Amino acid sequence: MTKKLSLFLSLIASTTALADSKLEDLLTGTDFTPALSGLQVSIMKNGEMFESHALGFARIEETVPEALRIDHKLRVASISKIVVAVGVMQLVDKNLLKLDQDISDYLGWNLRNPKFPQQKITARQLLSHTSSVRDGPRYFIEAGEGALKDFFNPESDFWDAGTHFANGSDEAPGQYFVYSNLNFGVLGEVIERISGRRFDLYMEEEVLVPMGLTARFDPCAVPDSQLAAAFRKRRKEGDWAPTGPWVAQVDAGSSRCFYGMQSNRQASQFLDGYEIGSNASLFSPQGGLRASANELLVVLQMLAKGGTINQNRILSVSSVAAMLEPQWILNEDSSNGLSAGEAEPGGPSDGLMTSYGLSVHRIDLREYGFDRGPNTVFGHLGEAYGVLSHALFDSETGDGIATIITGTSDDPSIAPGHSPLYRVEEEILRWWLNKLY
C-alpha cells in the first residue's frame, strides 16, 4: 500500500458518518483478518433502518482513491439469488407459475436429467438447489455464443460431457442438495418465457422499482458515479500479494453490461435482436445484481414485514412464508447433500449450508458458534470477484444486517474461525450481535 493510499484510508475511516471503531479496525486489518478495500454495513432493528456505515474506497483512478459511500452499488454476488426468488414468487402469486409443475412446461423445451428421465424438475427444486442441475465447468453462455438449453443438449458444445446434470443414483431431482448457479440461469429463462420480457427488465420493473430501489441487474444502467469496483491484492487468476497494490476485479472503468457485451452500444446492438427466453444466463441472475447494503436491507425489510415495503405489496404473506420454510435439511449422516456451498467438501466450509428454503439460506447461529442473538437467521451469503457479502435477518424481531466487503488484501481464509464463514465475516456478525442483543 502506498503512503498516499494509507493516509487516505485513515482519513476515510476517521471521517465516515457514524464510523465505528470495530469496523475501522477491520478495514485496516487485524492480527487475524486481512485489510479491506472497502466495507458497507447497514443494520435494521424491529424492521426499520437503524444505522449505516461506509468505509474504504470505491475506485482508484490514477492512484487517487474515491471514498466509498453508502449509496455506492457493488456486484453483490449470490445475494442476487434471493432477489430473483422474489421475482419468481411474484409469478406464483399471479397464478402464472406453479412451484411443483414440470419446469419444461414453462421453458418450451424438455429439461430432464438423463439419469432420471421419468422425474420432472420443478421451480421448487431449482430454487432450493435440489434439482439435480449442476454447474459443470461453466454456468453462463456469453451473448451470441448459444442458447441456455445448449447446456443440456448432448449434441452441443456446451454439453460439457454431461456435467450439468447429477449422475449419482441417490441424486434424483428433489432428493439431494448441491448448490448450483445454473439453477438460476434456468429460472431467469422461466421468468422471460412467462413474462415475455427480458430478465433484467422484468426484475427492474416488477421487483426493484416497486421496492423503491435503483439497484439493477444491468451494470450499464447504473451511473458511473454510483458504481464501485471490487478489489483484491492479487491478479484475477494469480497469487495473493498482501503488500502489493489493490487490483480491481470487476466494475472498474468501463462496465461490462452483460456477459459478452463490453459497452452500452454493443449491448444495444445485441439486445435489439435478442430472443426472449433464449439465454437469460448472460444477465447473471445468480450473482449480477448491483446494489448497496442499504438496498439489500430494504429486501430484508420487505421479507420481515410479510411482503410489503413502503406500503407496496411485493409478495403475498404465503409466498414469504414459503421462501423461509425449510425445503431441504441436511440429515444426520450428511447423505442427502453437500453442505460446503461452492467450496470443496471436506474443508472448513463444511456446514455452511445445512438448511435451505426457496433461495433462502437458513443459518443456525448456535451451530455456527455464536452464543447470542436469534437461533436462526434468514437470508443469503455471497462471494465473487473479491466481494464477500451477506444479508441476514431475524424473522421474529425484524432485526437484520446487510454487509458488502468490497475486497480483501489477502486470502480471507488465512485465519480460521469458529464457523464455516471467513473470520472477517464472523467479526462483523459478532459486532452486529453485540450491538443489538
Image: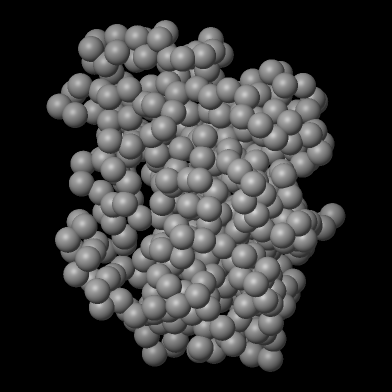
**Residue 139 occupies quadrant:** bottom left
Residue 71 appears at what percent x and percent y? 41, 32
User: How far across and down, in percent of the image, does residue 57 sit?
Assistant: 34, 25
The colour scheme is one colour
Residue 189, image x and y in percent? 48, 74
Res. 197 in view: yes
Q: Residue at x 41, y 62 (%)?
A: 200
Residue at 61% in and 70% down: 91
* x 53%, y 78%: residue: 194
User: Horizontally, is 200 left or right of 340 in the view?
Assistant: left
- Quadrant containing the C terminus in the rendered view: top right
| Residue found at the far right of this picture | 332
Please state if 38 lies on the left or on the right of 108 as rendered.
left
Q: Is residue 417 visible?
A: no
* 89 vs 273: above or below: above
Q: Using the image, determine if residue 3 lies above or below residue 80.
A: above
The residue under the point 69% across, 86% down is 119
From the image, which quarter does the N terminus lie in?
Answer: top left
Is 260 situated above or below 171?
A: above
